[in-house]
Image (spheres, grey):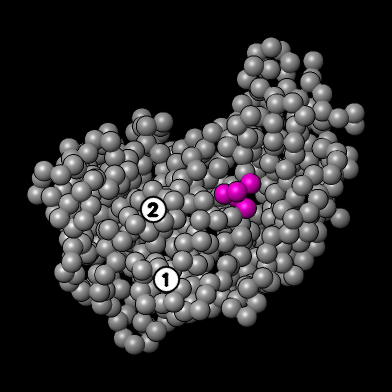
Amino acid sequence: MSAKSIVDVSLAQPGLTYSRDLFGHFIEHFHRQIYGGIYEPGSPLSDERGFRLDVIEAMRELKPTVVRWPGGCFVSSYHWVDGVGPERTPHYDKAWRVFDPNTFGTHEFIDWCEAIGAAPFICTNAGTGTAEEMSDWVEYCNLPSGSRWSNLREANGRPDPLGVPFWSIGNENYGDWEIGAKTSEEWAVLVRESAKMMRRVDGSIKLATAARADLDWTLPLLQAAGKYLDLVSIHGYWDKLDTVDEPSPYLTAVGASLGPQEDIQRTADIIGAVGLAGKVGIAFDEWNLRGWHHPWGNDEVSIAARDRNDDNSTYTMADALFSASFLNSCLRRADVVKMANIAPNVNTRGPLFVHPDGIVKRTTFHVMSMYANLLGSKVLDTHANAPELGGAGVPVIDSLATIDESNSRLTLVLVNREPESSTTCEVRIAGHDLDGVFDATVLDGPDKDAYNDIDRPDAVVPRKGKAQFKNGLVELPPHSVSIVEVDLPISYTAGAVVADARVGGWSLSPKGWERRTN
Ligand code: AHR
């Protein structure tokens, strides 16, 4: 019989306020993410601008705060000026080796962000682009009319600045796959000079740049350009489809769940080593369990292989559980992780599959919706002690707890990674066993490989119900993400309570919630 899983939630400290940009998104000019995804002029499901209304409605459910665009690898040979104004020049996209009509450009992106209620995050071309082209784009978007590029914006129908708050210099410029890849020395200089020019146009922008959890790349970058930056971008795909042809099975996929926290720690260590802790944060601005399927060839077979990303049967509870663990990792390190962007949000490996007649919400969509809609605004200290999941090298349980602004509602996230069996877990809050029946939202589905598809869109949907805790013990269904909402009877103020020597604040005993006096 395996050891018991124990989750301890501390109320001794005030919670850590996290950035809601951790629930951010990414969309790229790749395959059917833009064209035939969010943007489909002429479709009966689109508005007069060509935006798919069913997509907008679904996106709004995810309460997106920020969307990164236009790439990805795409951006490293993209010239933004081709995508504004009445005359759009189609171009051959040398990253993905297809034609892009340029009918979706800066204005369309800004309008789409407005439609879904998110802030735009523009990633610039630091592959074939120059510092000047990057800062011209800032000028086009953010400067009041009166300059060459802001006047062009006005001529294109938007007299007022578009107010793009988030910008990034480049994408994965360390990789030999990237157009215009750089050495770390070249990169440090280009970022420093680009950042200077972009900030001279608009000093208020939040600025990120392409980095990685690697000392050789990120140390010289931060030494040279750190004082101009707010964020370093890192990317992660843990089931790499360029080396593994088929998506990995459940245990392998779920077994990758500790990867994100290792990347966060390594990157945070580098930021700290340069003395920029607290000044520069991390934007995990591309993340997904599974890498995108795009063999690097421009023959018909390689291009057609992109359709394999559209196989909905490959988005299962493994993807859902990995995504929950990813978000938990970022939330636990919200002191340093300030943004995270699922890559992408629509089609390819995204939570939302879009086809000509409708949409399918994949398992990951529901996880993102649960997190965006149910969590409180501050993360509490939580510790899980759980046995290892056989053969996967990860604990059976992952957990997180949040508290809301008024300190009166505690939200508990419990991930059970066991594929076939339920797990008994003991939950203690402020050292006391949780007891009672609480509202719970559970995502599990009929089996670990369950998925949603056009003909079975609701095979995996969150179930609203109750979770029963007896002497702290709760039974978690197999392959599940549970979010439990615990109302505290009176709000607690952890900091004040500690100072007042009433250590622990509120505690739960068989008699109910009590203020601790010892
Ligand atoms: O596979 C995803 C693509 O490759 C994105 O364009 C890029 O940024 C990434 O590594």
Residue 239, compared with residue 336, is above or below; it is below
Residue 233: x %, y % from top left: 37, 49
Task: Judge the density around disc 2: few (<14), some (14-19), many (≥20) Cα neighbours within 10 Å.
Answer: few
327 sits to left or right of 82: right
Which SS class for mark 1?
loop
Residue on which disc 1 sits: 46
Is 364 covered by the magenta stretch? no
Q: Quadrant of residue 208?
A: top left
Residue 463: x %, y % from top left: 73, 59
Q: Quadrant of the N terminus?
A: bottom right
- Residue located 25% across and 77% down the image: 99
Amino acid, disc 2: Glu
Amino acid, disc 1: Ser
Task: Judge the density around disc 1: few (<14), some (14-19), many (≥20) Cα neighbours within 10 Å.
Answer: some
The residue most toward the front is 48
Label ID, residue 25: none
Residue 56: x %, y % from top left: 47, 62
- Residue located 10% across and 45% down the image: 147
- Residue located 65% across and 54% down the image: 394
- Residue located 61% across and 65% down the image: 363
In magenta, the rendered stretch is: 370-374
Residue 374, compared with residue 253, is above or below; it is above
Residue on which disc 2 sits: 114
Nearest the eye: 406 or 261? 406
Which SS class for mark 2?
helix
Q: Which callout, 2 or 1, points at the residue further toward the start of the chain? A: 1
20 sits to left or right of 217: right
Q: Quadrant of the C terminus?
A: top right
Residue 435, compared with residue 173, is above or below; it is above
Nearest the eye: 162 or 18? 162
